[in-house]
Amino acid sequence: MVAARYGSLPFREQIAAFRERVSIPTRAWDDVYGRENDQAFAVAGASRQAIVEDFAEAVGRAIEEGRTLEDFRRDFDDIVARHGWAYNGSRGWRSRVIYDTNLRQSYAAGREAQMADPDLRRARPYGLYRHGGSENPRPHHIAKDGWVVPIDDPWWDTWTPQNGWGCSCKKFMLSQADVDRLGLAVKDAPEIEYEERVVGANGPNPRTVEVPVGIDPGFEHRPGVARLRGITPRLLREPVPTARTAPARPAVDPPPVPRPAPEPPAVSGAEAEVGAFLARFGVERGADADGVTFHPDALGEILPLSRQLFVDDAGELALEQLTGNLYLVAETLATPDEIWTALVYDEAASRWRLRRRYLAWFQGGAVMMDWGRAGWAAWIGSPGSARFDEWRRGVRLYRRGEED
């Protein structure tokens, strides 16, 4: 694989394209797939938020400061050591894939942002596909070298590079004068043939996808099309609506069989219920009301828990519909049946929010706890409620009984 070299970078559009991506934990490379990568930054197998965010920061520095692969590998080693991350593959291969793929795709997204300029498209209405000279060239990519197609042709929605792991093909804009000078000819777009490929065969969620022949699964899109426009945290008391979710894939298996519910604590009143909730995570009754305990969830993600979780804007405890059921929320957080994560579009705020959902099915009631930097919310209902189908979408990070 040819190493990516970007001595003249960064440029503004590339930085914007990368920095607008939101870090999201995953278990496998295909948990975030295709154009979902315009919205989400993921590192295959990095299922804790802090690890993903550290990698995003390291890649961001590489883009902004023009750092080399060897520079990035020093950051890679530091992140692996600090988090104790056990990854698949060799150090050289994993670090190169993270570095090259993110630099190439963010570069392509930045170029697409430049190419979207209407005046530029009028002046240069054609796109030229150039093979990049990879060490192991793909025949389908070589066959398209020198192909000139109108820049507005839908063919580019599929065949805009990068078109596979390690692909170094490029897309250039041409004027009619450029076409004539280079001795090229404008052609109709090549026919796109499709084939079925299995992705995630060695992961927790294998599935069959349809991709164009010659393009690796996950690269069959034009980089940067679905970019986010930023995220601003805020406090929530209701679950974020799930109408728009990325990734939007639903669960393909049924929910777990409901298990016996824990015995409710022998307490009465909001203050006592909150105390019992915190005690489930090792906070002693009567402890400092402003103190915070840091609870590692089933995957090691650290969640700050304190009395302030249940305090409204007036400074009062506000359990509302959770009154009498807070112990079920605690049990869900402590021993979830499933953990899901996804980007959810908040229509009211016109922003994407990263949400982490803890679900548990008990005999007589099921619980969903919706967690994120924007706040948290919980919902309790019938184990068979269709609402749980809405929340079982995105990336399933964990299912009880299937621990690695």
Image: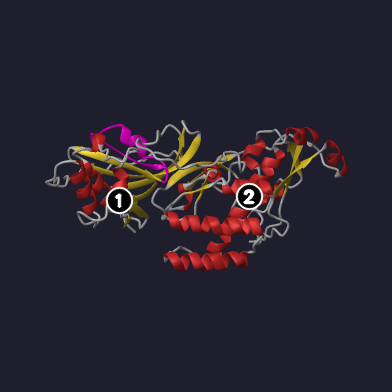
Depth order, front residue of 209/302 = 302
- The quadrant of the picture occupied by the C terminus is bottom left
Residue at numbered disc 2: 15
Q: In the rendered structure, which disc, 2 or 1, sits on the residue that comes first in sequence? A: 2
Residue occupying the point 24% across, 38% down: 322
- Outermost residue toward the front? 314
Q: Residues within 10 Å of mark 1 (few under 14, many from 20)?
A: many
Depth order, front residue of 376/80 = 376
Q: What percent of the width, then of the height, locates residue 163?
A: 62, 48
Question: Type of residue at label 2?
Answer: Ile
Q: What percent of the width, then of the height, locates residue 126?
A: 76, 37
Depth order, front residue of 387/27 = 387
Question: Type of residue at label 1?
Answer: Ser
Position of residue 386 in the picture relative to residue 225 (left or right):
left
- Indicate the secondary structure of the residue bearing disc 2: helix
Gap between marks 2 and 1 measured at Cα? 37 Å
Q: Residues within 10 Å of mark 2 (few under 14, many from 20)?
A: many
